[in-house]
Image (cartoon, helix red, strand yellow):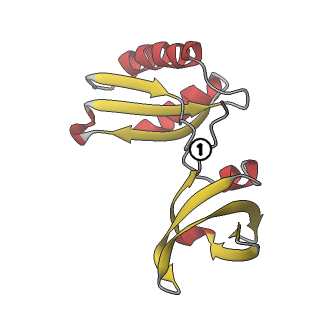
């Protein structure tokens, strides 16, 4: 079974969302980013890490180091559901191809409609094909 699917099934089974998954060259470092509606604490990361360590031993998955963490305040948006969940929040979007000579946009997420991302910028609504979004991240708004 594909490594990402193994990890996703395990993470979802524990009640978390798999936000992202990275490997270093030759998969010696495995980096797993998890989230949940109530947020992620160190105990959550420990729980997932311990579970994945045992699972990898059973599945004979070879690696040197495993890191499990939250996606951070600048959480990447990967799935259509992410754009819906974080509607109303500010995000940075990078497109695969430029629109009017521009690839990078920052604005407030206004949801998805017919596979198209709606982004409010400077009082105007911009619409992008979701499959043209190369990268998207939330803009951190720390509260002190």
Residue 1 in view in this figure: no
Percent x, y of residue 17: 62, 34
Q: Quadrant of the C terminus?
A: top right
Residue at 55% from the left image edge and 26% from the top image edge = 10
Residue identified by numbered label 1? 140
In this view of the protein, which residue sits in the foreground, 109 or 96?
109
Provide the secondary structure element on which disc 1 rests. loop
User: Does residue 96 lie above or below 107 as drawn?
Assistant: below
Left or right of residue 34, residue 39 in this image: right
Residue 74 in view in this figure: yes
**Dot 1, how many residues are within 10 Å of its Cα: few (below 14), some (14-19), or many (20+)?**
few
User: Does residue 81 lie above or below 66 as drawn?
Assistant: below
Percent x, y of residue 114: 75, 72
Percent x, y of residue 100: 53, 87
Q: Quadrant of the N terminus?
A: top left
Q: Residue furthest front?
A: 144
In this view of the protein, which residue sits in the foreground, 5 or 30?
30
Residue at 56% from the left image edge and 36% from the top image edge = 18
Q: Residue 119 sits in which quadrant?
A: bottom right
């Amino acid at each position: 079974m594909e490594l990402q699917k193994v990890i996703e099934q395990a993470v979802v089974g524990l009640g978390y969302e798999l936000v992202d998954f990275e490997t270093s060259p030759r998969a010696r470092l495995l980096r797993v980013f998890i989230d949940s509606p109530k947020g992620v604490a160190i105990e959550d990361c420990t729980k997932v890490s311990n579970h994945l360590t045992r699972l990898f031993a059973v599945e004979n998955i070879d690696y040197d180091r495993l890191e499990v963490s939250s996606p951070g305040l600048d959480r990447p948006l990967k799935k259509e559901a992410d754009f819906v969940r974080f509607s109303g929040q500010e995000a940075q979007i990078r497109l695969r191809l430029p629109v009017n000579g521009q690839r990078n946009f920052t604005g407030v997420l206004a949801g998805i409609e017919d596979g198209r991302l709606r982004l409010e910028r400077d009082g105007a609504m911009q619409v992008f094909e979701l499959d043209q979004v190369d990268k998207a991240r939330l803009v951190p708004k720390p509260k002190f």
